Image (cartoon, rainbow, N blue to C red):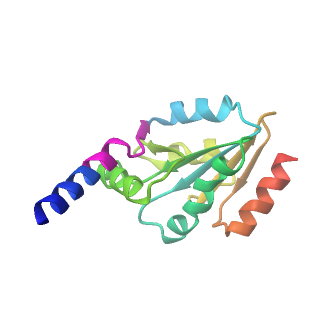
Amino acid sequence: MMKRIAFGLLVAISTSQVFAQEVEVVKFADLQKKMLNTEASLTVFNFWATWCGPCIKELPHFDALESENSDIKVYLVSIDFQSELEKVKSFVAKKSLNSDVLFLDEKDPDDYMGKVSPEWTGAIPATLFVTDLGKTYFHEKAFTKEELELTIKKYLN
């Protein structure tokens, strides 16, 4: 009986690794292409890190957006340190995130923050909303589920 349980756990663990969400490693130029070539009515870029408590708290709200509304595309952009890619992959698998997760492979945040938005002081969580018409809205704050829903409705209209 114990052997069957152990075998079942082993199969479950190995299967979850196979189907775990991939983390795409990107340079800022790749991210910028995604920002400029949006196809959804609203594309959301949420910048976060595994060490940021408010980021982790709001991630489920962002992760649920795409499955709740087909007009929305979500990218969860990790700005963790370059040496923490495996930590990010493990975190994403543990949290079973469904949105596209991008790992921004850049050394100096000052090189890309102003290109994301001139309003970005460097604080996270931070979110860039891009409409299909190319209009952008930037928020440097944590969202509650209710605030995010209201913001989405506002930018989709």
- The spot of residue 17 in percent (x, y) is 31, 47
In the visual, does 143 lie left or right of 104? right
- The spot of residue 132 in percent (x, y) is 78, 34
**Residue 12 magenta-drawn?**
no
The residue shown at (52%, 48%) is 98
Q: Quadrant of residue 51?
A: bottom left
- The spot of residue 73 in percent (x, y) is 65, 41
Question: Of 19 and 40, which appears nearest the observer?
Answer: 19
Image position of 69 with respect to 147: above or below: above
Question: Of 49 and 56, which appears nearest the observer?
Answer: 56
Image position of 1 with respect to 131: above or below: below
Q: Quadrant of residue 134?
A: top right
The residue shown at (34%, 48%) is 82
In the visual, does 36 lie left or right of 112? right
Question: Of 126 and 94, which appears nearest the observer?
Answer: 94
Provide the residue span drawn in magenta: 14-25
Residue 124 in sight from this viewpoint: no
Image position of 3 with respect to 101: above or below: below
- The spot of residue 28 in percent (x, y) is 51, 36
